[in-house]
Amino acid sequence: MSTIAMNAGTDERHGFDMIAFLAILVTIVFWASSFVVIRICLGPLTPIELAAARYVPAALIAVLYLVAARPALPARGDILRLVVAAVLFIAAYAVLLNMGERTVAAGPASFIINTMPVFTALIAIFALSERFGRWGWVGTAISFAGVALIAASGDDGFDLDPNAILILGAALCSAIASVLQKPILSRMPALAVTAWLMLIGSVPLLPAVPSALQALAAAPAEVNWGIAYLVLFPTAIGYVTWAIALKRLSAARAANFLYGVPPTATLIGFLWLGEVPTLIGAIGGVMAIFGVLVVNVMRKR
């Protein structure tokens, strides 16, 4: 039997952990598929309407959890930090990602989003006074060069797509939110923090709910099924399975598995929508992830 080590509130199992593996697998598939489903829903819904249709119902699920579980309320000193993180992590992230995916395919979009650890490391220089080092800057340059190739990869060669920059903005929002919520996660359960983020982060999207409902009423059935899928699987279940993985594995070990999201999203985009990445875009995707690996691994040496 595997031993169980308690570390900073994490029940980390050494050796193979089937439950953690299944939780990670479910998380990867659901989060990867969300990039594809977003592409399906855009058009009948605007980026803001899509964000509202996805996250406002998810916020209602979060309310049910908070009422049933009754976790401790956030400390007064954490409220501002939680509000800013929620708005960035939910509303700003969703709208920027949706705007970007109007023209950027699912696979490339997921590669750009996965540059988030690079932004997190850069922010840590100023927020936590961490040293970055030569390899950190090398990895950052490689990753951003990869994003530039993705942005410039069109079907006919180089064709700059500014929407890729919007997705990069979504990654930046996610990174800032991650840094802001890190101290809160040391004081509150991950599911409780996620529920509060969902609830607070959906508030700026409430004005778009009426137009989102009208758009859904006129949209094809596949769009309505797509919204239901986004709410239930990548958003609600995906965050729960990720919390399970974080509970049973160290954060660093669990996060390493998320490098599987971009290639999975690319495969799903190909099978579902027939999206074939260009050679330039594929090279850019590999560079983006390689740069993230350099930032996370080599800069620590």
Image (spheres, rainbow, N blue to C red):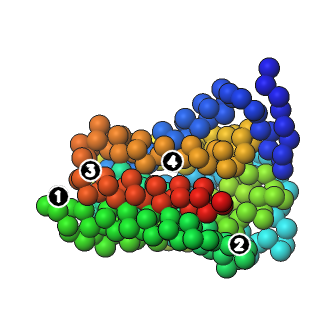
Q: Which of disc 3 and disc 4 is earlier in sequence?
A: 4
Find numbered disc 4 in the image and state the secondary structure of the residue it sits on: helix
Q: Which residue is drawn at 47% across and 46% down?
A: 261
Single out the mark in the foreground, 4 or 2: 2
Q: Work out which residue is located at the far left of the displayed protein and give it.
A: 156
Camera-side residue of 234 and 58: 234
Estimate the x, y position of residue 21 in percent, counting from the top left.
Answer: 62, 32
| Residue type highlighted by circle 1 | Asp
Q: Give the residue pinned by disc 4.
A: 259
- Determine the secondary structure under disc 3: loop
Q: Earlier in the sequence, mark 2 or mark 3?
A: 2
Amino acid on which disc 2 is placed:
Glu
Q: Name the residue under label 2.
A: 130
The numbered disc on residue 277 is 3
Query: Quick one: quadrant of the N terminus?
Result: top right
**Distance from Cα at disc 3 to Cα at disc 1:** 9 Å
Report if the CB atoms under discs 2 and 1 are less than 8 Å apart.
no
Q: In which quarter of the image is the C terminus?
A: bottom right
Front residue (pair 169, 39) = 169
Q: Which label's residue is closer to the chain start, 2 or 1?
A: 2
C-alpha distance separating marks 2 and 1: 41 Å
Q: Where is residue 190 in the image (x, y as percent from the top left)?
A: 74, 51
Q: How many residues crowd around disc 4 within 10 Å: few (fewer than 14), some, or many (20 or more)?
A: some
Counting from the top left corner in percent of width and height, residue 18 is at: 66, 26
Q: Does the CB distance between marks 2 and 3 fall below 8 Å?
A: no
Dot 3 crowding, Cα within 10 Å, few <14, some 14–19, many 20+: many
What whole-number distance in Å separates the C-alpha atoms at marks 2 and 3? 37 Å
Q: Which residue corresponds to the image point at 81% horizontal and 58% vertical from the top-left?
A: 186
Amino acid at dot 4: Tyr
